[in-house]
Amino acid sequence: MTITRRTTVHEGPGGLFESMAIFDDAGSAPRPGILLFPNVLGTKDADFAYAERVAALGYAVLVADVFGQGKRTTRADPDMGRYMAELNADRGLLRDRVNAVHAVLKSLAEADERRTAAIGFCFGGKCVLDLARSGADMAGGVSFHGVYDAPPFPSAKIGAKLLVCHGWNDPIAPPEATVALAKELTDAGCDWQIHAYGHTGHAFTDHDVDMPEKGLAYQPDADRRSFRSMVDFLGDLFA
């Protein structure tokens, strides 16, 4: 097995974007394609490492840039959420960008354009949901400790199957927001499931987060269980 990373610069709504294609160079092609949407910080080494784990399962992964080339932040940045805030304020632009990068995934030589899915973390979970809400022709999506608020315009009928991996004590997605999401997905005709992890807050897959007083902390059990749930979910999608 030879896991390869290939920087992919592409045009999209608002300029140039820089995503990362990750796949087993020794694997057969094409194979199912997976979009990976990062958290508030944008694409980074932690996303590439997670994508390598997914690629090792036999998928072609594109770590998706939706902020724009060079637009990245760190937790040391006092305004680390500025690029996310721009898209939260313009959900139509977010919809257009997630669909544009989905088209880039489908164009990869290593990916089967007829078999695609998306996974995302925190803000990336919102990206997964908004891609599904747009009626995108993907098989399914997985949101990890995502953000659930619906866009301020009607969504399409959701044909993608969705798995939502959720920390029950997440202050960003309290129980009422989770119930509202379940109702929204039901009303949209979506085949959905929510896996809620007790004693678990936001960012439970992120090894670098340790702010339990704010409800943000890595939770190894939820991280392990959600990864296994994702593996099973993707396996069912592409069986």
Image (cartoon, rainbow, N blue to C red):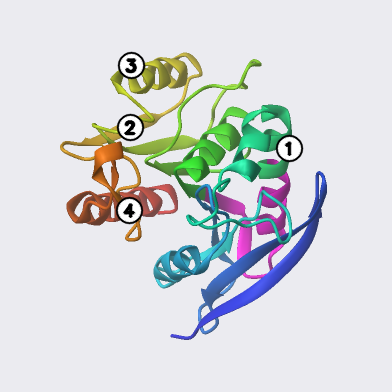
Neighbour class for label 3 at 10 Å: few (<14), some, many (≥20)? Answer: few
100 inside magenta stretch:
yes
The structure residue drawn at horizontal position 60% and vertical position 22%, both measured from the top left corner, is 151
Tell me the residue that label 1 is attached to.
Answer: 96
Q: Position of residue 86 (x, y in %)?
A: 68, 36
User: Given the image, on which type of amino acid does mark 3 rest?
Assistant: Glu
Tell me the residue that label 3 is attached to.
Answer: 176
Is residue 201 visible in the rendered image? The answer is: no
**Callout 3 secondary element:** helix
* Left or right: residue 46 compared with residue 223: right
Whether tag 1 and tag 4 are in contact, CB under 8 A, the answer is no
Report the span colored magenta. Answer: 99-117
Tag 2 or tag 4, which sits nearer the N-term? Answer: 2
User: Given the image, on which type of amino acid does mark 1 rest?
Assistant: Asp
Neighbour class for label 2 at 10 Å: few (<14), some, many (≥20)? Answer: some
Tell me the residue that label 2 is attached to.
Answer: 193
Q: In the rendered image of this protein, does residue 222 appear above or below residue 74?
A: above
Whether tag 4 and tag 3 are in contact, CB under 8 A, the answer is no
User: Given the image, on which type of amino acid does mark 4 rest?
Assistant: Thr
- Identify which residue, 50 or 123, lies in the foreground: 123
Whole-angstrom CA distance, mark 2 to mark 1, is 26 Å
Whole-angstrom CA distance, mark 3 to mark 2, is 16 Å
- Identify which residue, 213 or 98, lies in the foreground: 213
Whole-angstrom CA distance, mark 1 to mark 4, is 27 Å
Instruction: Give the number of the mark in front: 3 or 1.
Output: 3
The C terminus appears in which quarter of the rendering? Answer: bottom left
Tag 2 or tag 3, which sits nearer the N-term? Answer: 3
Q: Position of residue 80 (x, y in %)?
A: 56, 48
